[in-house]
Image (cartoon, rainbow, N blue to C red):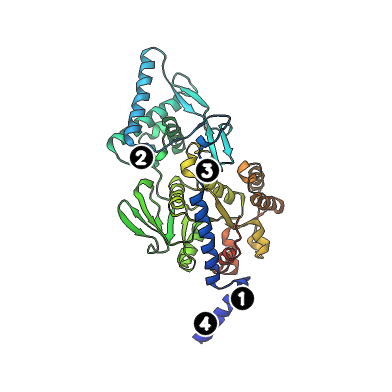
Amino acid sequence: MAESSKKRRRTNTDDLPFKNKLKPDSTILQILKDFSTSSSSSSSSSKALTLQDLSLPFSCREVSDLSLSSVQSIIESLVLRIAHSILSGNGFAFDVPSRSATNQFYVPELDRIVLKDKSSLRPFANISTVRKSAITARILQLVHQLCIKGIHVTKRDLFYTDVKLFQDQIQSDTVLDDVSCMLGCTRSSLNVVAAEKGVVVGRLIFSDNGDMIDCTKMGMGGKAIPPNIDRVGDMQSDALFILLVEKDAAYMRLAEDRFYNRFPCIIVTAKGQPDVATRLFLKKMKMELKLPVLALVDSDPYGLKILSVYGCGSKNMSYDSANLTTPDIKWLGVRPSDLDKYKIPEQCRLPMTEQDIKTGKDLLEEDFVKKNPGWVEELTLMVKTKQKAEIQALSTFGFQYLSEVYLPLKLQQKDWL
């Protein structure tokens, strides 16, 4: 009886849609090896362009990693200038770089968003800016303390040092980015980190604060990505590619199925909207291991937005895009054209809301989308059909369809954009 049941299960698995199109794993592995080799050669031979290499018609503002002593010195010089201004009877104001959409620009040669050099004054003696000026001064004071003590805190810790002044963490977080931009340093240089969010599993060994971590032995939960990238070093891997996954549910499916052993890879997720630590970690892996990055996101406008944040940067942190962006990420799936191609049933597709459609149309106007004709074609199809689907829609064919058929077939066909 048990043997009969096993045979029946095996037959059901073989009947999965499109499984008969799969070639032996050895064939797919050779395709991946060729892809990884060509990607590595391309990364090694091409020199990374910088803003300084381009003759742009305007100046831009970029930040860099600074030591704690340098950050401390810059803050003290800034406060000294403020003190002189107050003593001379002129009051004081902060010269804050503008991070508005009008002050940002997509540079095709760099394939990322940069921040122009426009700034605005934030005077203390003005009723519309007095509170934000006070918050700015308080954040500078707290960061100065961190420099002296040489310790790290989370953004949440920072908020709770003065809840009545900040009122909402969004306000303290926003000013923290302003301060980072003002001082000309990365947010990591301020020793303020976000709580751990992203996770990694698969064919990767790295040191975390001196401890060697083998990500094949982290179970299906994986290893939490350290909030401080300075703790990470000595990356080693025999992977052929990095698989960037939008959702935690898809990540857990792939981790439990040990997809990374069948097709050597490193699987990463930020569990939704990309956080700074995951973006820094992905960039470090790409640069040190010279591996191609393939992205698995939902077939909706927000999936593409998440992919673009990893690849081109976020408008909120465009001042640090050089450090936070990972160039040349390929869109593997789930793409709008896959819904018909893989015969996803209608009951597994969702109608796009008016806001979804607006977001899709807005994305079609973005230069970083226009640069990739494949993205334009897929996004146009999505807006036209007004249908979206999550990665989990593939579970209609079986909970392991993602790892057993969909991804292997995608890799076999080199079906990425």
What kind of residue is marked 1? Answer: Asp
Mark 4–mark 3 contact, CB under 8 Å? no
What kind of residue is marked 4? Answer: Lys
Of pointers 3 and 1, the one earlier in the residue sequence: 1
In front here: 271 or 42? 42
Mark 4–mark 1 contact, CB under 8 Å? no
Instruction: Return the x and y of residue 70 as percentages of the image width and height.
Output: 34, 32
Q: Nearer the viewer, mark 4 or mark 3?
A: 3
Cα separation between marks 3 and 1: 42 Å
Cα separation between marks 4 and 1: 14 Å
Q: Residue at x 48, y 21 (%)?
A: 127
Residue 313, numbered circle:
3
| Quarter containing the C terminus | bottom right
Instruction: Return the x and y of residue 96 as percentages of the image width and height.
Output: 47, 27
Secondary structure under badge 4? helix
The 10 Å Cα crowd at callout 4, few under 14, some 14 to 19, many 20 or more, is few
Instruction: Return the x and y of residue 184 as percentages of the image width and height.
Output: 43, 32
Q: Which residue is mark 1?
A: 15
In front here: 233 or 68? 233
Residue 6, numbered circle:
4
Q: Which residue is mark 2?
A: 191
Mark 2–mark 3 contact, CB under 8 Å? no
Of pointers 2 and 3, the one earlier in the residue sequence: 2
What kind of residue is marked 2? Answer: Asn
